[in-house]
């Protein structure tokens, strides 16, 4: 199994999404000790924002190649200002490439990456889940879901920690609940 592990939080050691994405990768590698992990820190080594000349750069080609080689992609994604960090958006801009991860047909676009599993560690300061008053302005989970569906990945798994900015107790409870979901993912992994 080839795992691509991405982090996009700017908060370093204080990052909930980094903590959760690391825990997910640990569960996956515990289940399959032969798994190969490629790590990309989109903050420490950011991709430039997309430009027309940027399509052909070595960095763009490397990001696409890493994605294509992966069986499982683990994404650490905090929600900033209701959506994903620009660093993560720049990575998606390198992965959504016509003829590589999707194609256009007479009946519409068709995703070409449906054989991949994606697990997203999503961290939110407030409450934006289904049934909350703030759901209509949540564009991180919704963006990631839509982008992945466009390239054929229709069942991503989300590990969500929300309410992280509502105090120490709320943060601890949210992280513990999310880590419980991580353990469930680990338990569901096939034994190598």
Image: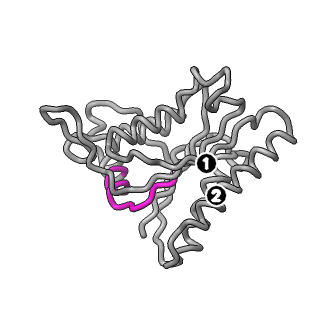
In this view of the protein, which residue sits in the foreground, 82 or 40? 82
**Residue found farthest to the left:** 106
* Residue 136 on image: x %, y %: 57, 21
* Residue 10 on image: x %, y %: 63, 40
Residue appearing at x 27%, y 44% in the figure:
111
Query: In the drawing, what numbered circle is on residue 182?
Result: 2
Query: In the drawing, what numbered circle is on residue 44?
Result: none
Label 2 residue SS: helix
Q: Horizontal placement of 100 versus 174: left or right?
A: left
Query: In the drawing, what numbered circle is on residue 159?
Result: 1
Q: Is residue 99 magenta?
A: no
Q: Horizontal placement of 131 versus 59: left or right?
A: right
In this view of the protein, which residue sits in the foreground, 56 or 169? 169
Nearer the N terminus, badge 2 or badge 1? 1
Question: What's drawn in magenta, residue-wise?
Answer: 63-74
**Residue found farthest to the front:** 131
Image quarter hosting the N terminus = bottom left
């Amino acid at each position: 199994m080839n795992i691509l592990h991405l982090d996009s939080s700017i908060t370093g050691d204080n990052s909930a999404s980094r903590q959760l994405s690391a825990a997910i990768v640990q569960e996956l590698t515990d289940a399959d000790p032969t798994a190969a992990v490629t790590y990309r820190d989109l903050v420490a080594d950011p991709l430039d924002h997309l430009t027309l000349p940027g399509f052909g750069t070595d960095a763009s080609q490397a990001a696409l190649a890493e994605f294509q080689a992966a069986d499982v992609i683990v994404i650490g994604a905090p929600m900033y200002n209701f959506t994903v960090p620009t660093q993560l958006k720049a990575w998606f801009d390198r992965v959504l490439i016509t003829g590589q991860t999707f194609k256009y047909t007479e009946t519409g676009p068709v995703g070409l990456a449906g054989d991949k599993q994606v697990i997203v560690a999503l961290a939110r300061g407030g409450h934006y889940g289904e049934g909350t008053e703030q759901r209509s302005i949540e564009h991180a989970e919704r963006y990631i879901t839509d982008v992945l569906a466009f390239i054929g990945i229709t069942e991503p798994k989300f590990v969500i920690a929300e309410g992280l900015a509502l105090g120490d107790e709320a943060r601890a409870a949210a992280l513990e609940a999310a880590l419980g979901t991580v353990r469930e993912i680990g338990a569901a992994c096939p034994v190598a």
